[in-house]
Image: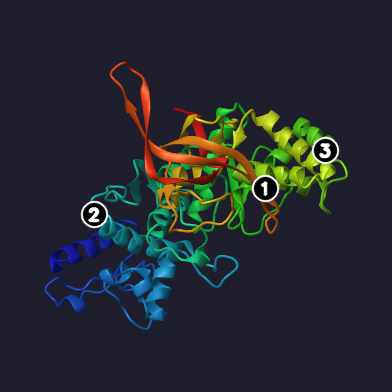
Amino acid sequence: MSPDLKTNLILAGAGAAVAAGLALTIYPSNQPDSSRQIHPIKNSTGSNPTPDTSYGNSYTLPDLVSPMSNLEDPELQRMINDVLGIDPYALAPRPISLREARQNFLVGVAMARQLHPEETIFQEPKGSTMVINGRLYDLQKPPDFFFANATLQGVLRRVYNHPSWGKRPPESVTEDITALSKRLAILNASVHPVVDPTMLADLNKGLDILESRGKKTPDKTVVVNNFSSADNGNVLTLAERGNVFDFLGWYYWHQEPALVEEFTRASVNMHRGLTIADDFVGTFREYLENGSIFRRRVLYAETLENHAKAQVLQAKYGVFRKWLGVDIGFKAYPKDLQDYQLGQVVWIEDPEEIYDSRNSGVYLRPEPRSDINPDWPNTRNGFAVKILAGPEVVINSEEEQAIRMYRVQSGNTLKLPDGRTAFVPDPNSQGWMPDDYLGAAS
């Protein structure tokens, strides 16, 4: 990367900092590359910004955008963790002021611009405002900054990914958070400025399916340090960490008394040691977060002829199926359940790949089994397969799931001159796969 480009990217962060009443230390562009460095700077109300001495060294912007696997300097790792709002060793976000978070945000914007110079998600600021993904935010207002920083976190955490940070945000994280900021008003006068962007993306997806099915959805939220299940009226309570489908479950526990009553009847004496409220919320989460796993649990009980458990699980599943009017696959993605016939050609519908293309690949197993091997052939979302055999049920005792599988032949479809569609098989790509990934007939 040329020195001039490197300087411009650092100055881009500086411009945003000045606009927001902050400052970054930028060395003159005529100095050697090693001297043009970014220092974390505390907010300055005067002419002399105060360096944050919690870091022993200073780093150039290219240092910050190096792949995480190449970072060996613990202080550099710590600085990137701060920009990403992450403490890998903490059970909850560390205390951080809005001022400090804004400073980290501005460094992060410069990082994002260097990582994705072709994208225009983060526009040049005007005063204390910045247009991000087409939406205007006032960075001085905590609710606005909450969504602005979450958008940045989503962009950066797709690059800097670490197992201790949880799952990588979906590709749609930017669009999801922008949509959420339009549909959900934060009521807090002040709010912790850092939150898991994946949680917000999943919340938007959950609200999408609920709204599309005609359900009342919250338009206000409060963000708290420690979650409370108390009734908050038509206000969704979010915690800084946790499962967003649990938070939604508690909202509907208070807002849908008829649903609660029906669930209570369906699950009588089968709460696994939980209160009825906890059971309701846990079942709501299971259904909306990954209905495929829920159905596998039902099939497991049926296959082992545990009729009592199977009956209750099916009844609880049925309550939410009736209420929502649709089966769910993965992360609130609707699923059309079908029985497939031999010789039928169907499309692969992989909600995990739809959620994030890096999850691509449905492995075709040599025999019905639950494990996978990257050396096996695979197919992908949107591809066609032909049903060759099945279904067979595979028991996974460790996870208490039963998986219904079909043997398929992967291939392509070809439009014929007479308008019919022909299936062209791939002779090297066939095997057994779960029916969770089979979609509509071609």
Q: Secondary structure at mark 2?
A: loop
Q: Considering only vertical position in the picture, is 384 above or below 17?
A: above
Pointer 2 residue: 117
Q: CA distance from mark 2 to mark 3?
A: 54 Å
Pointer 3 residue: 264
Q: Secondary structure at mark 3?
A: helix
Which residue type does callout 2 highlight? Answer: Pro
What x and y, as percent, mark residue 361?
44, 49
Pointer 1 residue: 402
Q: CA distance from mark 3 to mark 1?
A: 26 Å
Q: The C terminus is located in which quarter? A: top left
Q: Considering only vertical position in the picture, is 372 above or below 293?
A: below
Which residue type does callout 3 highlight? Answer: Thr
What x and y, as percent, mark residue 88?
51, 70
What x and y, as percent, mark residue 325?
64, 28
Quarter-of-image position of residue 35: bottom left
Residue farthest toward the left in the current orientation of the protein: 30
Q: Is residue 61 visible?
A: yes
Quarter-of-image position of residue 326: top right
